[in-house]
Image (cartoon, rainbow, N blue to C red):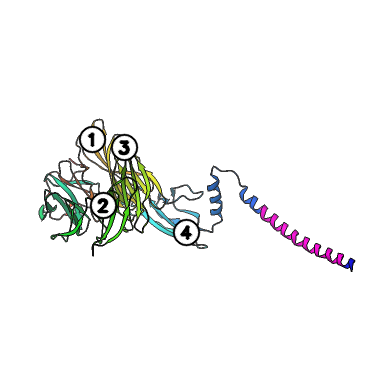
Amino acid sequence: MKFLFLESDKLVAVKLNKYWLILFLGLTLILVIVVKFFNKPYSKQTPQSSLLNKIINYVPKTTLSLTTTQEGIKVLFDQQLENIKQPFVIPNTIQLPVGNYTLQAFKDGFETKTMNIKLENGKQQNVAIELSPLSTIINPRFYRLITEKDIAAIGWNQKQLLYQTQNKIREAEKNSNLINLPQNSQLQFTGSDAILVNTQNNLSLITNLLKIKPLGLNSSLARLSPSKTKIALLKNPLEIEIINLDNKQPLTTISFKEGEINNFNWSPKEDALVITSFFKPNYAVFLAKLENNPPSKILTTTNPITDIAFSPEGKYLTITNQRQVIIYDIEKNSNLIIKQEDGLIANLAIWKKESELILIEKVNQNNKVFDKITKVNPLTGEKKFLAISAPLINRISWETKPVLSPNTNALALKENNGSLWLLIFEGTITDFFPEVKLPLEDNSYSAP
């Protein structure tokens, strides 16, 4: 019995040793795989990015084939791609992890095209890209429409170009009076059939160019939402209140704890506000979601911020001061600073479309002041010349921001002495105003 017990105990021990041996061999195999995985040639990457790239390499990939019949078309994605230098010329075939991508295809003399692409596992995606030539776009021309002085504000009402002079709203094509305003009124044109009127902090609304309707609301600074259903009011230097215009009831309040609010604007989807504040000696920009999220700071500068604006689809923000224009990518939380001209005095940025920004730079070179107008690619910062105002004349007023026509083919701007000009990018003056009677100073490639 004793022998058998010992023999039985020995048999049990042998079985246990076999199990441990299998476990040991398995762990050793896993360790070898891990060592080979991480023991790759050294590259100039941080440990974090190196690990991330190794993980990405194991994400399922698929093939993207970009084809074209046109020579010299370049493609740029809205994100960095592993082992792919951008921009690159197509046709080209690349391997990418599955997922959603946005790309821009561009070429000098052709219209830039933006495309959204979804890559799925195991499915090759073939994308043919053809660009439209800019043959229909003439050299931009300035047209002086109105010679009346003291224009306080300009804006579009659908196809009508309107301007405020003294206490009136007038129409540019026929130079006719439309609406009389209370004294000391400030206007916010919306590009549609609604105009917000602020008369000594009392707010009113004009719709369909008819009469002024008081809103029963008060604020020193107010912004009408794109849908005209909500209004944002500066309640005090630290609070913005969002009001439903149908019932005049508060929807939410955005509270501030850093500096005093001095400007704000709506996002295109009305789900956020971009806000600027001043906290001596700094100026800051915040993005505030309306879903009870506190404002998040995205930028701080010592230069006064002169303008903030969302791109048409809300992907980017332009943050403008006298020294620079910054394009902030909201999704990527990154900044792109546009390279600007020597002798820069001031600048303005106006979104033409999601892939194109109009930049106006007031420049002093060799004691000559002029305005240089370029278009900018928000992904790359690349600038292309459009037009220039005449030397020796400080032409474009910076007190009133130029406004783009609803079809984005023309830019209305105010001259320093108050006159109203139209800079046409595409088409002719009669495309906008069939009945306009032009002064002698018209049809020029630069302002006279």
| CB contact under 8 Å: marks 4 and 2 | no
Q: Which residue is mark 4?
A: 99
Amino acid type, callout 2 = Leu
Report the mark closest to the observer, 1 or 2. 2
Rendered-image quadrant of the C terminus: top left
Q: Position of residue 110 (x, y in %)?
A: 33, 51
Asked whether residue 26 is drawn in magenta, I would say yes
Q: Tell whether 219 sits left or right of 116.
A: left
Residue that sits furthest to the bottom in the current view: 1
Amino acid type, callout 3 = Glu
Look at the image and give the residue range highlighted in magenta: 5-32
Mark 3 element type: loop
> What secondary structure predominates along the stretch shown in magenta?
helix
Q: Is residue 318 above or below residue 244?
A: above
Q: Which residue is mark 2?
A: 234
- Taking depth in this image into account, of 442 and 40 the one nearest to the observer is 40
- Dot 3: few (<14), some (14–19), or many (≥20) neighbours within 10 Å? some
What residue sits 28% from the left and 56% below the top? 241
Amino acid type, callout 1 = Val
Rendered-image quadrant of the N terminus: bottom right
User: Mark 4 or mark 2: which comes first in sequence?
Assistant: 4
User: Mark 4 or mark 1: which comes first in sequence?
Assistant: 4
